[in-house]
Image (tube, helix red, strand yellow):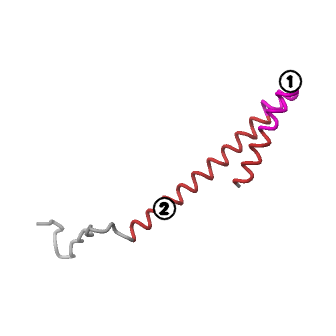
Amino acid sequence: MLTAACWFALFAVALMIWSLFDPRPIPVIVAMSIGQGVGTLSLLVFAYLVLTEWRAETARQGSVERLSPVPGTQAAEEPSAGSSGVRR
């Protein structure tokens, strides 16, 4: 998907450059409509990929932190079934 987002962005840039070198109405309209749409699509795909990768990475780090406590700290004791849960 990342490769497709890059190709979409390059295509959008090509349409924008075409309108710079050929300033007739049709290339400008194509660049402003199709180029903008394709460029926005590439940005949305890229943002989606960044967000999903970020969420997966934070989930992996969270599971690692839960499995390996920080050295030098003690785990909190759980109250037994007969106790009231109040620590002294």
In which quadrant of the rendered image does the N terminus lie?
Answer: bottom right
**Disc 2 marks which residue?**
59
User: Who is closer to the viewer here, 70 or 39?
Assistant: 70
Indicate left or right for 56 with 35 as reference.
left
What are the residue bounds of the magenta stretch? 13-33
Looking at the picture, which amino acid does disc 2 mark? Ala
Indicate left or right for 80 with 18 as reference.
left
User: Who is closer to the viewer here, 30 or 74?
Assistant: 74
Seen from this angle, which residue lies furthest left? 88
Indicate left or right for 15 with 78 as reference.
right
SS at badge 1: loop
Against 30, is 25 above or below? above
Q: Are marks 1 and 2 in contact (CB under 8 Å)?
A: no
Q: Which mark is residue 23?
A: 1
In the picture, residue 35 is in which quadrant? Answer: top right
SS at badge 2: helix
Residue drawn at 52 percent across, 56 percent down: 55
In the picture, residue 81 is in which quadrant? Answer: bottom left
Q: Mark 2 or mark 1, which is nearer the start of the sequence?
A: 1
**Count of labels in the image:** 2
Rounded to the nearest angstrom, the CA distance separating label 1 from label 2 is 50 Å
Residue 44, how many percent across, how many down? 66, 45
Against 41, is 87 above or below? below
In which quadrant of the rendered image does the C terminus lie?
Answer: bottom left
User: Who is closer to the viewer here, 10 or 49?
Assistant: 10
Residue 21, how many percent across, how many down? 86, 28
Residue 28 lies in magenta, yes or no?
Answer: yes
Against 2, is 77 above or below? below
Looking at the picture, which amino acid does disc 1 mark? Pro
